[in-house]
Image (cartoon, coloured by chain):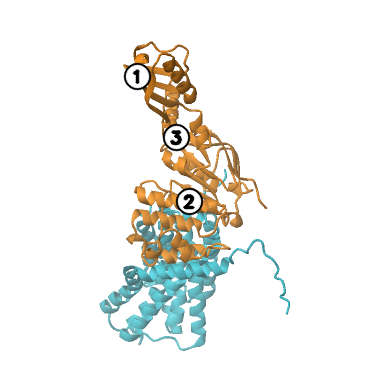
Chain colours: A orange, B cyan
C-alpha cells in the first residue's frame, strides 16, 4: 500500500474576510520526503498546513493526503498523521511521561514512551509537570506528542521558532533521523537555513502563492554567484574585456562580477590577464545561499505587488 | 512442535472507543485530584450550603421531628448534581475549547464519543464526591439519617444517575456559549444560581410564585430536588412540601429524560473539535 505521493494539492484557496490567505497553491510531496514550506509571517503557511491536516476548510482546490481528502478524514486516517501545531497546550497538572503515555493510547500502534523521550532528550524531564519546562523542552514535548502514534506523515508547523540555536540544532538532528526512518515530513518555517538544512524540496510561499519551488540546490543553482578578485601586473591598469556576461564593477584593481556562470567568468578573466602579462589574486567565488535567493524572491514579489 | 501461524494483521485495530473513554476519565480524574484547590472548593460548595443553612436555621421543622439538616440535604444533593454538569463540566470544556486543547485532540484518532464518555464519567465522579462529603458531614454533625429501605436507594440511584446524565449533556451543550475561557464561569454561574433559587432547593416551593414555579418546572433541577426529597424525607411530607402535593417521580423521570434527549441533540449539533466544517 505504498503511495508515491503523500500529499497532492491543487489550487488550494482560502479567504478570511477580505484577506486572501491562500490564492491557488499547488503542492506535491512524495512519500519519504522532507518538504519545507518557506515564507514570511502571514504568508499563509499555517492555513495551508491546517487545510492539509483537516482542521480547516478550503474555499477551492483539491487535496489528497495519504489517499484521502482531509475534509473527509476518519479516525484511521488521523492515526496515520502526526501534527505539531504552532500553539502548544497541555494540562499543567500532568507530567511529561503521563501526557505522552495518554496521547499514545489514542493510537493503534504507539511508540514506547521511554525511547521516544530519550530520542528527544526529555528523559530527565519525564516526571516534570509541563509548567516546569523551558520553551525548548515544551517544544520537544509537542514533537513527542506529534510522533507518539508512529505516523507516516508528520506536519511540523514552525518547529523551531523562537528557540535558541542549540535546541534548534538538536531538533534538526531529530528531524533528520526521523526522515531517515522513512517518515514523510511537511514543515513550515521562516528560517531559510532550516529549509536548506532539512528539506529535499522547498516551496517558497509569499502572500498565499508559491513563488518558487524546487530542491534547495535547484533554487540556489539558477541564481547568481559573486566572483571577486584583484588584478596584478600590467592587466591592473588595462581596460576590461568586452562581452563578458554578468554585471561587472571595478574599484581600482578590485573587480567584482555578479554572474550565473562563475566558471566562465573566471576562465575569461584568467585568459585575458595572462595575455596581458598579469594575473588574478585574492580570487573568491561566492554562491548566494538560499537565504539570499529567498530575500531576492521576497523583494521581487513585493516590488511586483506594489506596482 | 510446529508454531501455529498468527493471523497477520497488517493494520492494527484502533483502540475501542469505550475503553478509551474510561482511560480519558482516569486522566480527567488525575488532573482534577492534583488541582488541590479545585478539589477543595468543588467538594466544599455543597458543604458550605449545608453548614450555612444548618447553622442559621438550627433545629427541627415545625410540627415534625425532621431536622433542618435532613430537610436541606436532598435539595443540596440535587443542586450538586446539576452544578457538576452545567458548571464544572461546562467550564472545563469551555476552557479546553478556547485554549486549543480540543483542536490538538482533533488531530488525534481520539473519537468524540471517548472524549465525552471521559467528561460524563468525570461529572458522575464529581457528583458522587460532593454527595459523599455532604452526607458524611450531614450524618456526623446535622443528624442526617440515611434511608434504610432498599426502595428509597433505588429511587436515589435512578434520580441521581438520570440527573448526572441530563446535567452532563446540558453542560456539553452549554460549553459552546462562552466566547472566551475567561467568561466561562460568569456564563455558567448565572443559570445555575437562577435555577437553584426558583426550583425549591432551599426555599420551599410553595412560597415561590406560581408562574415562577411553572418556569422552574420546565428545568431539571426542580424534579431532581423532588426526587431526592422522596429519598430523604418521610412519605407524608409530600402533601405539604411538594408543589403538586406529591413527589411526582413519574413526571420527574420524564422531564429529566427529555433533557437528556434535548441536551444530547443540542450537543451533537454544537460540539466542535475546532475543525471547520464543510459549507
Check if mark 3 and mark 2 are on a common chain: yes
Label 1, secondary structure: give it.
strand
**Separation of residues labelled 3 and 2 (CA atoms):** 20 Å
Which residue position holds label 3? A290
Q: Nearer the viewer, residue B88 or A291?
A: A291
Relative image position of residue A256 (x, y in whole percent): 38, 21
- Residue at which label 1 appears: A232
Give me the C-alpha separation between circle 1 and circle 3. Answer: 33 Å
Residue on which the image places disc 2: A175
Asked if residue B45 shows in the view, the reply is yes
| Crowding at mark 3 (Cα within 10 Å: few <14, some 14-19, many 20+) | many
Q: Position of residue A89 (x, y in %)?
A: 41, 56
First along the sequence among labels 1 and 3? 1
Q: Which mark is residue B81?
A: none
Residue A154 falls left or right of residue A171: right
Q: Position of residue A1 (x, y in %)?
A: 67, 53
Amino acid at each position: 500500500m505504498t503511495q508515491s505521493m503523500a500529499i497532492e494539492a491543487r489550487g488550494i484557496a482560502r479567504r478570511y474576510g477580505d484577506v486572501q490567505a491562500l490564492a491557488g497553491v499547488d503542492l506535491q510531496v512524495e512519500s519519504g520526503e522532507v518538504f519545507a514550506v518557506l515564507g514570511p509571517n502571514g504568508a499563509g503557511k499555517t492555513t495551508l498546513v491546517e487545510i492539509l491536516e483537516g482542521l480547516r476548510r478550503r474555499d477551492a482546490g483539491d487535496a489528497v493526503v495519504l489517499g484521502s481528502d482531509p475534509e473527509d478524514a476518519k479516525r484511521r486516517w488521523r492515526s496515520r498523521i502526526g501534527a505539531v501545531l504552532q500553539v502548544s497546550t497541555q494540562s499543567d497538572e500532568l507530567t511529561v511521561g503521563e501526557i505522552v503515555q495518554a496521547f499514545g493510547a489514542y493510537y493503534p500502534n504507539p511508540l514506547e514512551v521511554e525511547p521516544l523521550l530519550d530520542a528527544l532528550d526529555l528523559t530527565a524531564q519525564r516526571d516534570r509537570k509541563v509548567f516546569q519546562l523551558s520553551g525548548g523542552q515544551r517544544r520537544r514535548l509537542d514533537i513527542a506528542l506529534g510522533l507518539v502514534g508512529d505516523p507516516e506523515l508528520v506536519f511540523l508547523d514552525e518547529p523551531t521558532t523562537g528557540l535558541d540555536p542549540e535546541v534548534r540544532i538538536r531538533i534538526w538532528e531529530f528531524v533528520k533521523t526521523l526522515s531517515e526512518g522513512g517518515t514523510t515530513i511537511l514543515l513550515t518555517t521562516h528560517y531559510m537555513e532550516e529549509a536548506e538544512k532539512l528539506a529535499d524540496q522547498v516551496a517558497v510561499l509569499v502572500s498565499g502563492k508559491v513563488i518558487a519551488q524546487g530542491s534547495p540546490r535547484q533554487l540556489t543553482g539558477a541564481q547568481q554567484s559573486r566572483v571577486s578578485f584583484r588584478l596584478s601586473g600590467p592587466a591592473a591598469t588595462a581596460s576590461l574585456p568586452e562581452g563578458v556576461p554578468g554585471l561587472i564593477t571595478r574599484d581600482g584593481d578590485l573587480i567584482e562580477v555578479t554572474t550565473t556562470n562563475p566558471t566562465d567568468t573566471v576562465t575569461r578573466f584568467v585568459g585575458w590577464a595572462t595575455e596581458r602579462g598579469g594575473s588574478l589574486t585574492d580570487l573568491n567565488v561566492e554562491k548566494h545561499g538560499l537565504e539570499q535567493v529567498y530575500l531576492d524572491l521576497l523583494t521581487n514579489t513585493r516590488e511586483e505587488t506594489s506596482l | 512442535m510446529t508454531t501455529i501461524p498468527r493471523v497477520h494483521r497488517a493494520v492494527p485495530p484502533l483502540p475501542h472507543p469505550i475503553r478509551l473513554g474510561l482511560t480519558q476519565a482516569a486522566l480527567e480524574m488525575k488532573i482534577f485530584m492534583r488541582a488541590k484547590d479545585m478539589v477543595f472548593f468543588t467538594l466544599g460548595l455543597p458543604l458550605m450550603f449545608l453548614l450555612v443553612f444548618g447553622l442559621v436555621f438550627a433545629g427541627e421543622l415545625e410540627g415534625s421531628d425532621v431536622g433542618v439538616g435532613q430537610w436541606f440535604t436532598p435539595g443540596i444533593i440535587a443542586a450538586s448534581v446539576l452544578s457538576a454538569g452545567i458548571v464544572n463540566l461546562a467550564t472545563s470544556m469551555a476552557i479546553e475549547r478556547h485554549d486549543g486543547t480540543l483542536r490538538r485532540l482533533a488531530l488525534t484518532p481520539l473519537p468524540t464519543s471517548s472524549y465525552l464518555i471521559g467528561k460524563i464519567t468525570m461529572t458522575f465522579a464529581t457528583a458522587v464526591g460532593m454527595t459523599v462529603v455532604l452526607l458524611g458531614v450531614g450524618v456526623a454533625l446535622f443528624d442526617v439519617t440515611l434511608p434504610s429501605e432498599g426502595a428509597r436507594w433505588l429511587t436515589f440511584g435512578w434520580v441521581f444517575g438520570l440527573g448526572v446524565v441530563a446535567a452532563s449533556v446540558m453542560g456539553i451543550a452549554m460549553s459552546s456559549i462562552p466566547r472566551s475561557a475567561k467568561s466561562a464561569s460568569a456564563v455558567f454561574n448565572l443559570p445555575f444560581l437562577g435555577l437553584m433559587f426558583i426550583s425549591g432547593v432551599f426555599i420551599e416551593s410553595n412560597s415561590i410564585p406560581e408562574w415562577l414555579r411553572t418556569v422552574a418546572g420546565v428545568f431539571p433541577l426542580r424534579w431532581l430536588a423532588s426526587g431526592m426529597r422522596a429519598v430523604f424525607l418521610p412519605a407524608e411530607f409530600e402533601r405539604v412540601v411538594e408543589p403538586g402535593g406529591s413527589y411526582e417521580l413519574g413526571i420527574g423521570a420524564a422531564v429529566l429524560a427529555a433533557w437528556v434527549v434535548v441536551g444530547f441533540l443540542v450537543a451533537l449539533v454544537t460540539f466542535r473539535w475546532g475543525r471547520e466544517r464543510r459549507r
